[in-house]
Amino acid sequence: MVRQFIKSHITDGLRLSIRNLLNEIEIFRSHQRGVRQARNISCQPHLKLHIGCGPKPKQGWVNIDLSPHADLTLDMREPLPFRNNSCLMIYSEHFFEHLDYPSHAKQFLRESLRVLEPAGIFSVGVPDTSWPLGEYAGTRRDNWFKISKERWHPAWCQTEME
């Protein structure tokens, strides 16, 4: 009876918002568990972080994701629960492009810089960047930036890379 009432009296938009809220609550709970677990790891020297490991964890690394395959479940939109200068390497592949830009993407970059040791390695792979990077570097001239700015970019974008 309640389910029928909800189905007939709640809009699709509200239903989607409730589903998103419940998802965010679960992410919050997982993140809190991961922060507690990180306390045992964060004192180790020369940490190697594999961010967004998905179903492919790396041996010898601290694998971080919201998936059950990870060593730590952390919400990467939040500050990293590691000490300053405590990580030798940070690696991710096919993760960074999922962060909202500029807020979450810039926070992730700031946090990565904060926890990296001096001369630490930061390696991030993102898909399909050869064509925008080629145009940015001047080795490609097919007006990608002009077209993408007209079609997809919000007004706050100032540079070609944004």
Image (cartoon, grey):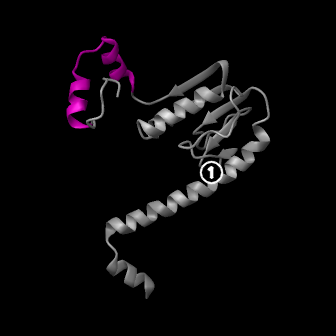
Q: Residue furthest top?
A: 139
Image-quadrant location for residue 11: bottom left
* Residue 133 forms part of the magenta stretch: yes
Q: In terms of secondary structure, what is the magenta stretch mainly?
A: helix
Instruction: Provide residue 67's location: percent of width, then percent of height.
Output: 60, 49
- In depth, the one of 123 and 154 nearer the eye is 154
Q: Tally the marks.
A: 1
Residue 87 on image: x %, y %:
69, 27
Residue 102 vertical position relative to residue 37 in the rendered view, above or below: above
Which portion, as a residue range, is magenta?
129-152
In the image, 62 versus 17, the foreground residue is: 17
The correct choice, above or below, for 112 with respect to 76 in the image is above
Query: Which residue position holds label 1?
Result: 31
Residue 116, how many percent across, how many down?
Answer: 65, 25
Residue 139 picture quarter: top left
Instruction: Residue 31 in the image: state x and y as whole percent.
Output: 62, 51
Callout 1: helix, strand or loop? helix
Q: Is residue 45 magenta?
A: no
131 and 8: which one is in front? 8
Identified by mark 1, the residue type is His
* Residue at screen point 43% across, 30% down: 127
Q: Residue at x 46, y 30 (%)?
A: 126
Q: Residue at x 31, y 24 (%)?
A: 159
Q: Judge left or right: residue 90 versus residue 16.
A: right
The N terminus - image quarter: bottom left
In the picture, residue 62 is in which quadrant? top right
Please indicate, yes or no, whether residue 106 appears anywhere in the rendered image. yes
